[in-house]
């Protein structure tokens, strides 16, 4: 039996008055029992119970977990939350209790294994899932269970969790189910571990959403809005391809080929930025030619083999000419040990195209020149934005 008493300082404490019987304390109100339960559980969790008494106290804690008053059981659970001291039987008893008792254990107990948390998530009760999401870290199996449960708010919280391990398969499932949700789409974009192929698909979805919005269509007109968003999507895709890791690049290119989205404009952007390794990989997949052979053609920069390669890739002649000069500008710069700026690359290509038009006035280079002018405008806008950033931010 337990008996409360006050210490010399006036603080309430609990002592064992006699061996534990069928009742865990003397008859008392629910409020008193809750206070005593919290005191005893806190002492047990913090190692203040003498070693010889711990087994008896552990038995008392199990009795407290069966107290008819939820306020008492809640006080017990709150005092033990986050502690490795209680038995697993006690923790699972509290987890299976009403929500107010279960939540402190679900959100903090180190004794809950991944299988326990997955089972809790599968119950489909929002408050329990929210408690799981409050844990300091979440493993891949637990994250996958939360994704499978499929509530948008829970998935958004998961994506923003600072220490949640979300594997690529789960990220794909989120993208497939919630690509139309702008907030979830943004949270996916913010993740550094998002596979490049998924990032590109989400970029297309975002562009389509903007193009289809009433505001964009009303201000710009439907066709102009669609054109601008397609160009933005194309620029973004080229950036994603350019920045993709070696491990991601193959899947990304395969995905672009399935979408028929590996356009000549993307290849031109890669060439103009000097991303020749990535350009080699793209041309290899487009033509079925070995990477070694494609690299040799780009390095040698001879017109006839280059044109044949581009024809095999299905590129139009205007794009082929521009691609050839872009590659050759970088090849020449490499020989000189030069690293031209994007503006210098565009200017050098324009000079070469203008010379070709002068030699053969019948050839139309206007589409290629239009592309370069657009690229120059993009570069100017980007540089302008950088120049307008505050000094601290730019630094």
Image: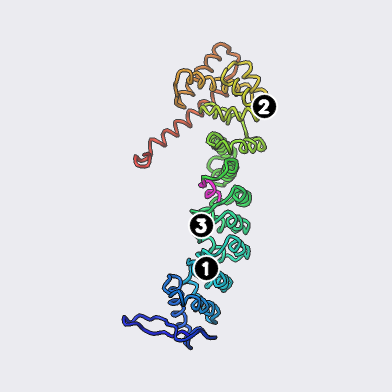
Question: Does 325 lie within the magenta span?
Answer: no
Kindly indicate whether the residue at mark 1 contacts the one at mark 2 (C-beta within 8 angstroms): no
- Mark 2 or mark 1, earlier in chain: 1
Kindly indicate whether the residue at mark 2 contacts the one at mark 3 (C-beta within 8 angstroms): no
The answer to whether residue 8 is left or right of residue 382 is left
Determine the residue located farthest toward the bottom in the rendered image.
Answer: 27
In the image, residue 263 sits, relative to residue 149, either above or below, namely above
- Residue at 52% across, 20% down: 331
Q: Could you classify mark 3 by the number of other residues whose Cα lies within 10 Å: few (under 14), some (14-19), or many (20 or more)?
A: some
Determine the residue located farthest toward the front in the rendered image.
Answer: 52
- Residue at 66% across, 22% down: 311
Element carrying mark 3: loop
Work out how far the residue at label 3 is from the one at label 1, CA to CA, in angstroms: 14 Å
Identify residue for label 2: 287
Element carrying mark 1: helix
The x and y percentages for residue 319 are: 60, 24
Kindly indicate whether the residue at mark 1 contacts the one at mark 3 (C-beta within 8 angstroms): no
The x and y percentages for residue 29 are: 47, 86
Work out how far the residue at label 2 is from the one at label 1, CA to CA, in angstroms: 58 Å
Write down the region rendered in magenta: 184-191
- Of 280 and 27, nearer the camera is 27
Identify residue for label 3: 137
Give the main secondary structure, helix, strand or loop, of the magenta stretch: helix
- Mark 3 or mark 2, earlier in chain: 3
Identify residue for label 1: 105
């Amino acid at each position: 039996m337990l008996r409360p008493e006050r210490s010399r300082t006036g603080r309430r404490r609990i002592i064992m008055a006699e061996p534990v019987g069928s009742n865990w304390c003397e008859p008392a109100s629910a409020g008193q029992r809750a206070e005593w339960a919290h005191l005893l559980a806190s002492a047990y969790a913090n190692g203040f119970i003498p070693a010889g008494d711990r087994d008896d106290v552990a038995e008392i804690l199990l009795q407290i977990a069966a107290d008819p008053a939820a306020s008492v059981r809640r006080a017990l659970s709150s005092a033990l939350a986050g502690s490795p001291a209680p038995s697993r039987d006690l923790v699972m008893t509290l987890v299976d209790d009403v929500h107010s008792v279960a939540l402190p254990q679900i959100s903090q107990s180190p004794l809950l294994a991944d299988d326990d948390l997955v089972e809790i998530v599968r119950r489909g009760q929002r408050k329990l899932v929210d408690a799981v999401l409050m844990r300091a870290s979440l493993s891949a199996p637990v994250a996958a269970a939360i994704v499978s449960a499929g509530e948008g708010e829970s998935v958004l919280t998961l994506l923003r969790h600072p220490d949640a391990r979300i594997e690529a398969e789960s990220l794909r499932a989120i993208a497939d189910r919630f690509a139309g949700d702008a907030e979830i789409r943004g949270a996916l974009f913010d993740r550094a571990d998002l596979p490049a192929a998924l990032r590109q698909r989400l970029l297309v979805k975002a562009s389509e959403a903007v193009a289809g919005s009433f505001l964009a269509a009303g201000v710009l007109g439907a066709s102009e809005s669609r054109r601008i968003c397609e160009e933005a999507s194309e620029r973004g895709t080229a950036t994603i391809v350019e920045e993709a890791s070696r491990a991601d690049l193959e899947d990304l290119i395969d995905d672009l080929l399935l979408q028929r989205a590996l356009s000549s404009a993307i290849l031109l952007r890669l060439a103009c930025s000097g991303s020749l390794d990535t350009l080699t990989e793209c041309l290899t997949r487009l033509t079925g030619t070995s990477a070694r052979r494609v690299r040799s053609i780009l390095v040698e920069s001879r017109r006839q083999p280059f044109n044949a390669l581009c024809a095999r890739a299905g590129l139009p002649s205007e794009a082929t000419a521009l691609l050839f000069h872009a590659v050759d500008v970088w090849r020449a710069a490499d020989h000189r040990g030069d690293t031209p700026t994007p503006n210098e690359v565009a200017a050098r290509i324009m000079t070469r195209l203008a010379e070709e038009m002068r030699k053969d006035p019948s050839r139309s280079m206007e589409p290629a020149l239009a592309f370069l002018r657009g690229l120059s405008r993009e570069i100017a806008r980007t540089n302008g934005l950088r120049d307008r950033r505050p000094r601290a931010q730019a630094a």
